[in-house]
Amino acid sequence: SFASVVDVLSGEIAVGSEITVRGWVRTRRDSKAGISFINIHDGSCFDAVQAVVPSEVDNYQSEVVKLTTGCSVAVTGTVAESAGQGQAFELQATKVHVYGWVEDPDTYPMSPKRHSMEYLREHAHLRTRTNVTGAVMRVRNCLSQALHRFFHEQGYLWVSTPIITASDAEGAGEMFRVSTLDMMNIPKKDNGQIDYAQDFFGKEAFLTVSGQLNVESYACSLSKVYTFGPTFRAENSNTSRHLSEFWMVEPEVAFADLNDIAGLAESMLKYAFKAVLTERADDMAFFQQRIDSGVIDRLQQVIEQDFVHMDYTDAVEILQNCGKKFEYPVAWGTDLQSEHERYLAEVHVGAPIILKNYPKDIKAFYMRQNDDGKTVAAMDVLAPGIGEIIGGSAREERLDVLDARLDEMQLPKEQYSWYRDLRRYGTVPHAGFGLGFERLVTYVTGMQNIRDVIPFPRAPKSADF
Ligand code: 4AD
Ligand code: MG
């Protein structure tokens, strides 16, 4: 029967059982005594399993000793306790089938040496063959499953919100336009150029920047909901923390206020960190050893401590008086730059921090105004090494206040008419947030660049594959 590498290495399969493992060759080594040791990985866990292949195997001379890194194989044999150090179990092979050879092993892009992350990005279709990208993708999967489990256990409904939309959820004008290019009937302007202005079957449409507005409408009837899907930002940011296409987890809760969702964010993150430390201990040990020596302790500490809450106004004072020279000056009313966010999280608290009650002028139109008339009930969760990983708020549920804000910001009321309906028919206080999923994966793994934690990164000038 067939088995995964993890089944063999975990001891799930009884010693003496005959099984077949299928995967890719990581390394091959031949002993003088006419035995080959082949390490095979299949993505099911960090480690590869060692197959011990004796020269009695039929195709030993013709094939086995020619195997190179990246070849795909099926190895049949008996599970045995391993004499060597490292692994408890190995496979005593009786048969080796080669599915596919590696053409010209000398130029195989994933040769078994250490490659730079930039190089791996240029080979995004093959980089999951490496230890590092394999580990990232298993951790990414674990986090995503854990988040779904968390919300499910808390009684939330998962809502699939649309990717094609007419509304600008952030009101920041950073949307990609969607075209229906009917090649037989391309809309043309008078000057003969393609008319992209009205092109979703005759209407303007965009890729969503956030599922929030749609998920709000579900919260205002189903009470506790969340969306988890891809979102798009047409901002020309070439940094290690920005993507043009990223995934967001957005819970939205009726009858909740700012502190309720701050608490939700804290328990959600702790739940996800616990899951990854127990379920992906193998990959986390690798990140600790090779990428970031503090990564496991850091997560452990976050799980054990209460999050620090701080008002924006107090944060500005701390930043102004901390004696550190920042590239951008800090003044009440200006948005915090990543250097400020990182100072607060890394130096001032040394852990994730929840900043609350920002000036209304630097935040989106939908955030609920506080009684002081100057600030809104917003929160950001800032993490050491990364800065903002979560942004959220209480939502403005009062129609008159919302309308005044839309006018003030010169946003078109027609575009938000359905959103305003929610305030006209049985409005309720509600609040929610968005977790940048790739920022979370970056934080958890200790990876340096957000482009290395999503399968095929999309960023300005990078949409290959
Ligand atoms: O702060 P943002 O823009 O908030 C919203 O979109 C709200 N509508 C969410 C809500 O309340 N439901 O984005 C939320 C998070 C940020 O904190 C950040 O982690 C991530 O999304 N994010 C990005 N991640 C990668 N690349 C980008 N360009 C990102 N922009 C935002
Ligand atoms: Mg934000």
Image (spheres, helix red, strand yellow):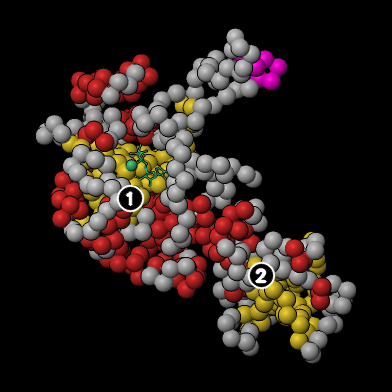
Residue at 43% across, 62% down: 446
- Left or right: 247 as drawn, with respect to 349: right
Residue of label 2: 112
Residue 183 colored in magenta in the image: yes
- Location of residue 439 in the rendering, given as x and y in whole percent from the top left corner: 41, 52
* Type of amino acid under label 2: Pro
Residue at 64% across, 13% down: 192
Who is closer to the viewer here, 192 or 296?
192
Considering only vertical position in the picture, is 120 above or below 27? above
Q: Is label 1 in a helix, a strand or a loop?
A: helix
State the image quarter where residue 462 is shown. top right
Q: Tell me whether circle 1 and circle 2 mark residues in contact (CB < 8 Å).
A: no
Who is closer to the viewer here, 465 or 50?
465
Residue of label 1: 338
Which dot, 1 or 2, sits closer to the camera? 1
* Type of amino acid under label 1: Ser
Residue 29 colored in magenta in the image: no
- Location of residue 92 in the rendering, given as x and y in whole percent from the top left corner: 72, 80
For mark 1, does the 10 Å Cα neighbourhood hold few (<14), some (14 to 19), or many (20 or more) residues?
Answer: some
Counting residues from the start of the chain, the first of labels 1 and 2 encountered is 2
Q: How far apart are marks 1 and 2 (CA)?
A: 36 Å
State the image quarter where residue 118 is shown. bottom right
- In the image, the segment drawn in magenta is 182-188
- Location of residue 163 in the rendering, given as x and y in whole percent from the top left corner: 49, 32
Considering only vertical position in the picture, is 463 above or below 10? above
Name the quarter where the C terminus is drawn: top right
